Amino acid sequence: MDITKDDQISLDDALVAPADRLKIGKCNLLLSLDVASKEATLQVVYDVLNLTPFYKAFQVSADVPEIYMQEFWASAYIHNRSVRFKMNNKKHILNLDQFRHILQICPKVGNEKFEEPPLEKEILAFLASLGHSGEIRKITDVNVNKLHQPWRSFTAIINKCLSGKTSYDSLRLSQAQFLLGMYNNKKVDYAYLLWEDFIYQIENKNTKKGNAMYYPCFTKLVINFVMAKDHSIP
């Protein structure tokens, strides 16, 4: 059955009212495999990131109906460390293993265990060793611009890929854990770090001052994953 534009608008409005929709910006920067920079330090940063186990998560996305992205963030909540949400008014559950499968990074290998993510105390000592010029007693004291190169570029790119911020001043713990794991070549479960950050955004979505959608690229991958499994979703 053919659906007119007006019919589609009515269907979309029934899922998420226009007033409740979020602005989809450029959060989650996509890094290209063939990126080339005229600035030598930045090019080295791109080349090194290309060798990391989490790089693929920064270069994948999917084309999905925008209304399902809106419905995800309008309905998503956390229950028993899983994400529960609706798509086309159907209930779905997403867990860490599915999220890891979607990103296809850091797969589990037999009984081999990932190293525990470093705690804030270790992170602060690490950042100080990279030449942070200011005193840091807690993670909120960290200013990316006070790091020496090339660490400033590494941190800025990871920060943009995860938060989409154009300002590089602040740094979250998960972003610093990415940097330390990469620097020390640790077997870190980067999918878990992304998952924890994803959950954090969902848990705090109603306290945000702005109306920008968090993690739109990862949201697209989740929507695409569900649509591939459930062909009844138009």
Image (tube, grey):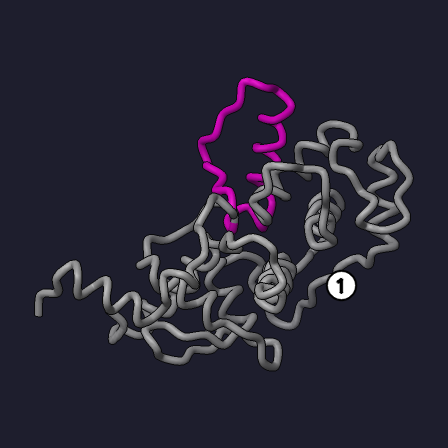
Quick check: can you spot residue 109?
no
Q: Is mark 1 on a helix, strand or loop?
A: loop
Tell me, yes or no, whether the highlighted magenta stretch contains residue 56: yes
Where residue 45 sits in the image (x, y, percent)? Answer: 62, 32
Most distant residue in the left direction = 1
Q: In the image, is residue 96 above or below residue 67?
A: below
Tell me, yes or no, whether the highlighted magenta stretch contains residue 180: no
Q: Which residue is drawn at 27% across and 72% down?
A: 233
Q: Quadrant of the C terminus?
A: bottom left
Where residue 64 sits in the image (x, y, percent)? Answer: 32, 57
Q: How crowded is mark 1: few (under 14 residues within 10 Å), some or many (20 or more)?
A: few
Residue located beneath label 1 in the image = 116
Where residue 193 sits in the image (x, y, percent)? Answer: 65, 59
Q: Which residue is drawn at 53% across and 23% down?
A: 37
The residue segment tinted magenta is 28-57
Q: Quadrant of residue 9?
A: bottom left
Closer to the camera in the image, 1 or 4? 4
Q: In this view, does 169 lie to the left or right of 72?
A: right
Q: Is residue 123 left or right of residue 69?
A: right
User: Callout 1, which amino acid?
Assistant: Glu
Closer to the camera in the image, 101 or 64? 64
